[in-house]
Image: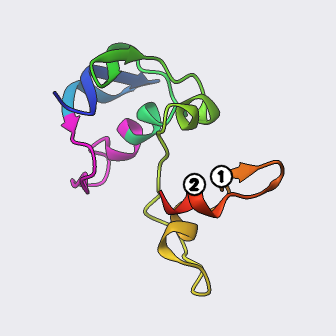
C-alpha cells in the first residue's frame, strides 16, 4: 500500500481543465518528482495535495485512509508540505531547515531540534 495516494483527481478553473482523472501513488521515505510541460497540471496537483486548492473530484489517502486537507495548515498536520520549485535556499541553513522554512517544529515556543532531525 502506498503511503500517499491521489485517486481520480480532477480540477477545473474557469475555461481550463487543469487535471482530468489523475491518479498517482507516493511511497514513504522516497523522493518523487512530477515532470511535464508548462500547464500540464503539476503545480495544481501539488496544491491540491497540500490543501491550497480543493479537487472537484477524487480522493487523497494516507496509508489507505481518506483525508481532506482544507488548507495548508491542515495538510501540514497530516504530514504534507509542498516544496515549491522556485524555492530560493538559504546557504547558511541545513537541508532540513531549508525544506521546513516557515514551518519549523517547535516545543513550548522553542525550536525542537530533535523533531527537526526526524
Earlier sequence position, callout 2 versus callout 1: 1
Give the residue at x 39% y 46%.
43
Tag shown at residue 115? 2
| Residue 40 percent location from the top left of the image | 26, 44
Question: Quick check: marks 2 and 1 in contact, CB under 8 Å?
Answer: yes
Quick one: SS at disc 1? loop
Circle 2 — which element? helix
Against 55, is 43 above or below?
below
Query: Badge 2, how many Cα within 10 Å: few under 14, some, many 20+?
Result: few
* Residue 103 included in the magenta stretch of the image: no
Is residue 100 visible in the rendered structure shown here? Answer: no
User: Can you give x and y, in whole percent of width and height, for residue 110 in the image?
Assistant: 80, 58
Q: Which residues are magenta?
A: 25-45
Q: To which quarter of the image does residue 62 belong?
A: top left
Residue 15 in view here: yes
Residue in the image at 64% along x and 34% along y: 73
Front residue of 17 and 83: 83
Q: Residue 29: where, in percent of width, then height?
A: 28, 51
Q: Residues within 10 Å of mark 1 (few under 14, many from 20)?
A: some
Distance of label 2 from label 1 (alpha carbons): 6 Å
Quadrant, the N terminus: top left
Q: Is residue 108 above or below residue 60?
A: below
Q: Which residue is mark 1?
A: 105
Q: Residue furthest right?
A: 109
- Seen as rendered, the residue at the extreme bottom is 92
> Does the magenta stretch mainly form a helix, a strand or a loop?
loop
Residue 18 placement (x, y as % from top left): 33, 32
Q: Nearer the viewer, mark 2 or mark 1?
A: 2
Amino acid at each position: 500500500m502506498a503511503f500517499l495516494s491521489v485517486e481520480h483527481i480532477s480540477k477545473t478553473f474557469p475555461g481550463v481543465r487543469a487535471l482530468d482523472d489523475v491518479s498517482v501513488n507516493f511511497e514513504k521515505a522516497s523522493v518523487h518528482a512530477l515532470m511535464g510541460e508548462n500547464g500540464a497540471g503539476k503545480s495544481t496537483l501539488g496544491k491540491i495535495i497540500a490543501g491550497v486548492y480543493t479537487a472537484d473530484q477524487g480522493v487523497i489517502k494516507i496509508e489507505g485512509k481518506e483525508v481532506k486537507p482544507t488548507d495548508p495548515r491542515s495538510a501540514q498536520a497530516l504530514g504534507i508540505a509542498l516544496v515549491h520549485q522556485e524555492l530560493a535556499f538559504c546557504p547558511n541553513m541545513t537541508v532540513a531547515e531549508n525544506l521546513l522554512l516557515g514551518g519549523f517544529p517547535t516545543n513550548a515556543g522553542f525550536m525542537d531540534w530533535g523533531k527537526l532531525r526526524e
